[in-house]
Image (spheres, rainbow, N blue to C red):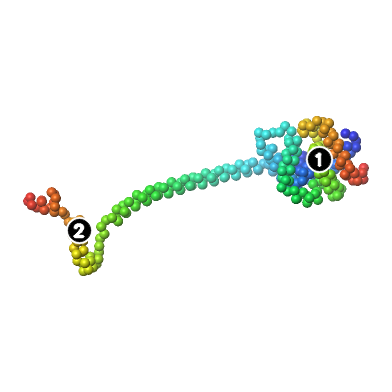
Amino acid sequence: MGPYDEEMKRYLQEFRPQEIRELKIAAQPRNILWRRMAAAAAVAVCAGGLFWFARRESTRSKEAANIQAPKVAVTHQPEHRTILALTTLALADNERFEAFLAEESQKSLPRFQGERSALKVLAKD
Amino acid sequence: MYEKHGAALAAYARSCGLDHASAEDVVHQLFLKMLGEKAFVPQLPLAYLYRATRNASLNLRTGRKRETDLQAAEPWFAHPNGNQDEVLNLQQALRELPEEQRETVFLKVWSGMTLLEISEVTETPLNTVASRYRYALEKLRDRLGKYFQKRG
């Protein structure tokens, strides 16, 4: 390098590159680590919540199925008509009223047919 | 290292066509990357930083060609006598240099490396580096002659 080049170099060195902002290095990696951990925790909580909710719902539906079963049985029981309804039926259609009574008497009164019927017991006596 | 070479690297990024904020971002990201990747410790960090700055700047500039003309009027050097015209002429002259010559000038003048060190970090023969530097100074002298002569 000649002296002329050295002079030129010194001339160029008079120009200073513009300052740039400080480099903040300490907070950055920790910040990223915390963000990642927070994101992982959020995902874990969401997944746990969904799992818990799904299990709860399935248990509930099972319980509901168990509870509903007796209800169905109840609905198949013979309907109890009120006195007013029976009176109306007797006045309007006597034959149906008689049939209803006969049917109900078979369900509620003891049977007189069969080996252990009340009639046979009385006959033996 | 950041305090010593950060500003020169940002100026180099600006010579590759970036605005001030983008040049700062490029330099910051490079230092953070270098500090963050503990497994990767370049043997010649300054050469790595110059090369990486150039690559990042060129990648970033690809989508921003329109902005380059506007940036030509923005100073990325400061001169003690405050002559803005002189600063802009220097910037333009640096932009017009071939990439290798510009890199050599930055490494020699503003990063304070010897030609031998530049030869090692750029993996280029010493004679080639010396030629690049000499040609670059000639071009800069031609371009900045009027200011340089006044001073001399």
Residue at which label 2 appears: A103
Q: Is residue A75 above or below residue B116?
A: below
Residue B107 percent location from the top left of the image: 80, 37
Extreme left residue here? A125
For residue B106, which quarter of the picture? top right
Residue B151 percent location from the top left of the image: 91, 44
Which residue occupies the foreground of this view, A112 or B39? A112
For residue A104, which quarter of the picture? bottom left
Camera sees residue A9: no
Q: Is residue B100 above or below residue A116?
A: above
Residue at 75% across, 48% down: B65
Q: CA distance from mark 1 to mark 2?
A: 113 Å
In the rendered structure, the residue with mark 1 lies on which chain?
B
Residue at 92% across, 44% down: B149
In the rendered structure, the residue with mark 2 lies on which chain?
A
Image check: B60 left or right of A89?
Answer: right
Residue A82 percent location from the top left of the image: 25, 64
Disc 1 marks a residue whose amino acid type is Pro
Residue at which label 1 appears: B98
Which quarter of the figure is the N terminus of chain A placed in? top right
Label 1, residues with CA under 10 Å away: few <14, some 14-19, many ≥20: few
Disc 2 marks a residue whose amino acid type is Glu
Label 2, residues with CA under 10 Å away: few <14, some 14-19, many ≥20: few
Extreme bottom residue here? A91
Answer whether labels 1 and 2 touch (C-beta < 8 Å). no
Which residue occupies the foreground of this view, A33 or A5? A5
